[in-house]
Image (tube, rainbow, N blue to C red):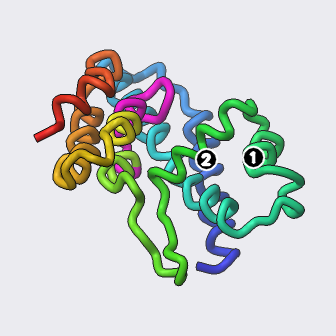
C-alpha cells in the first residue's frame, strides 16, 4: 500500500469520527441509543488493532537514534500517553499484531484468536476491557503443558472474553488451571 492510500484511510477515519461527533441524537429511542453505544464500543475495541502493526514495525525497524531513546519512551512522547501505558501497548502489539519472520515473511499474531476477535470488535483492550484475561492465561500456562493445552488456551480464552463482560471472566490462573486437558 502506498503512502497516499495510508494517509487517505487515516483522514477518512478522522472525518468519520468528526461526523459522528456532530450528530444530535435527541430524536433516538432508548433502544436506538443502546445500539449506537454498542457500535461505539465495537469501534473502540477495534482501534488498538490499527496501532499494532505500527508499533511492531517501529520495534523491528527503528533505531534508538531515530526514536530518540527507547521505543516506550518515544511512543509515550509522540502520543502523549503515560510511560506506564506505552510498554503495555508494546506488549499487546507483540501478542496481537502481525509479525514477520527473520526472512521477512508475514506471520500470524502470537494470540491469533484474540487478535481476530479484537479486529472484529468482540474483544476489549487492557486494562478496562476484556483482553486482560485473553492475554494473561496463555502466558501462565507453563511450557511443560501439552502442546494442545497451549494451542487451545488462547482461542478458548478469546471466546470467553468475547462473550462476557470483564467482571464475568474467571481470573487467568483459574482459566489456565482448568485448561490443562
Q: Chief secondary structure of the magenta span?
A: loop
Q: Residue 56 colored magenta?
A: no
Q: Quadrant of residue 6?
A: bottom right
Q: Residue at x 42, y 70 (%)?
A: 107
Q: Residue 14, relative to residue 56: is it above or below?
A: above
Residue at x 29%, y 33% (from the top left corner): 161
Q: Are marks 2 and 1 in contact (CB under 8 Å)?
A: yes
Residue 122 visible to an observer of this rendering: no
Magenta residues span 119-133
Mark 2 vs mark 1, CA separation in Å: 9 Å
Where disc 1 sits, the SS reads helix
How crowded pointer 1 is (Cα within 10 Å; few <14, some 14-19, many 20+) is rated as: many
Q: Which residue is mark 2?
A: 90
| Relative vertical location of residue 8 with respect to residue 26 in this rendering, above or below | below
Is 164 left, or right, of 97 in this rendering?
left
Tell me the tag on residue 75.
Answer: 1
Query: At numbered mark 2, what does the secondary structure look like: helix, strand or loop?
Result: helix
Mark 2 surroundings: few (<14), some (14-19) or many (≥20) residues within 10 A: many
x%, y% of residue 65?
A: 89, 62
Q: Earlier in the sequence, mark 2 or mark 1?
A: 1
**Magenta region includes residue 122:** yes
Amino acid at each position: 500500500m502506498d503512502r497516499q492510500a495510508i494517509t487517505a484511510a487515516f483522514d477518512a477515519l478522522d472525518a468519520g469520527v468528526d461526523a459522528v461527533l456532530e450528530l444530535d441524537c435527541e430524536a433516538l429511542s432508548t433502544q436506538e441509543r443502546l445500539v449506537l453505544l454498542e457500535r461505539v464500543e465495537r469501534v473502540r475495541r477495534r482501534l488498538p488493532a490499527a496501532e499494532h502493526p505500527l508499533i511492531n514495525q517501529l520495534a523491528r525497524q527503528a533505531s534508538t537514534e531515530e526514536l530518540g531513546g527507547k521505543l516506550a519512551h518515544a511512543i509515550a512522547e509522540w502520543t502523549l500517553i503515560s510511560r506506564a501505558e506505552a510498554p503495555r501497548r508494546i506488549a499487546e502489539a507483540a501478542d496481537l499484531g502481525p509479525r514477520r519472520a527473520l526472512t521477512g515473511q508475514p506471520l500470524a499474531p502470537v494470540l491469533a484468536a484474540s487478535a481476530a476477535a479484537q479486529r472484529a470488535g468482540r474483544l476489549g483492550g487492557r486494562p478496562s476491557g476484556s483482553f486482560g484475561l485473553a492475554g494473561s492465561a496463555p502466558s501462565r500456562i507453563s511450557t511443560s503443558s501439552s502442546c494442545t493445552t497451549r494451542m487451545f488456551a488462547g482461542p478458548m480464552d478469546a471466546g470467553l472474553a468475547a462473550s462476557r463482560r470483564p467482571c464475568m471472566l474467571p481470573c487467568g490462573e483459574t482459566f489456565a488451571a482448568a485448561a490443562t486437558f
